[in-house]
Image (cartoon, grey):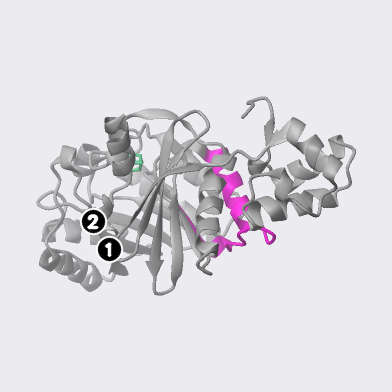
Amino acid sequence: MSSNKIDLRGLSKSEMEKFFENLGEPKFRATQVMEWIHGKGVSSFDEMTNLPKDLRMKLGDVAQISPLIILKKQVSKIDGTRKYLFKLHDGNTIESVLMFHDYGISVCLSTQVGCKMGCGFCATAIGGFKRNLSAGEIISQAITISRDLTEENERISSVVLMGMGEPLDNYDNSIKAIRLLNLPQGLNIGNRRITISTCGLIHGIRRLSEEGLPITLAISLHAPNDRLRTKLMPINRRYPLKELLKVCKEYIQKTKRRVTFEYALIKGVNDSKGAARELVTILRGMLCHVNLIPINAVRERKYEPTERSQVNEFLRELEQGGISATIRRGMGADIHGACGQLRKRELKER
Ligand code: SF4
């Protein structure tokens, strides 16, 4: 595909209207084309049968709908979780995950190729950072998976930006993609069903609190004190816990929305009773919820998941301390569940 053609997948409604205005076409063409791209998931102008043939040809000359190519799709035999490995136009690869819950189907999208944050337990961090994804590339993951689901008469009901990359490090494209996920003529995912997850970029959190987007903010916390958090997550050196929690409180105050704290339990590292008590101390009084995640093992990192009985005990400590918490069901354990592992294997094979 020619790179000087404009990729229509990443255009907002107003940008699409402007695009057609520049072509000398009426505004309603923008709605029609967005329905085809975001609602029906088509990637060729020929399929847009309600557009005049000469317009379809004109669009083919100046624009493209850059598709993602499914390189691999793995399906878990345990719970049906699907992992997609997508190839981008420049040969880079990214992962997305689809999960079945009793409340619907969720997808986890990537926002960057690789990641700069270097978290110690993460497979994505191993390969370093390559580049940001465009809004079109972020939304395309959901569109492509949705098209895959349509054949089964299913639809995506919620989305998490928690795959490869740090969404707030690619702020504008992540927010643009969220607004595209909202499109009534597209995937029509309500803001309350969208979660953005961050390792704690406080400037991004501040900016997000001004957006007026009632989405869920999830913070990857994973440790109850600076010593341990810095060991697991280098970003903590730049934004220590005190600052991070302060900005979370400001976010809650401004948006009146509950913040989720993700806490991946790692055997012998952050899963003691004492750690649970420290967590209670730092979160007490906040409008928040803690998601306890039994970590997926990453071979290179030598971290192991906490035993179930210990996970239950950790949960009990939090609840007794008055902190709302749940244990997240481990998904896709048989298909390299941890984010970035499928891509890493593919890079190795290459
Ligand atoms: S856990 Fe998230 S923020 Fe940390 S390195 Fe992995 S992808 Fe990046």
Mark 2 lies on residue: 334
Contact (CB < 8 A) between labels 1 and 2? yes
Residue 164 against residue 209 in the figure, above or below: above
Measured as percent of width and height from the top left, residue 209 is found at 54, 51
Residue at 57% over, 61% down: 191
Based on the picture, tell me whether residue 275 belongs to the magenta stretch.
no
- Seen from the viewer's position, the closer of residues 232 and 244 is 232
Ligand 1 in which quarter: top left
Q: Where's residue 139, x and y in %?
A: 56, 47
Let me know if residue 195 is in the magenta part. Answer: yes
Residue range (magenta): 171-196
- The percent coordinates of residue 60 (x first, y second) are 74, 35
Q: Is residue 209 left or right of residue 289?
A: right
Could you tell me which quadrant the C terminus lies in?
A: top left
Please give the name of the residue rendered at 23% of the width and 67% of the height, measured from the top-left corner.
Answer: 318
**301 relative position to 74: left or right:** left
* Alpha carbon distance from label 1 to label 2: 7 Å
Q: Position of residue 123 (x, y in %)?
A: 27, 40
Crowding at mark 1 (Cα within 10 Å: few <14, some 14-19, many 20+)? few
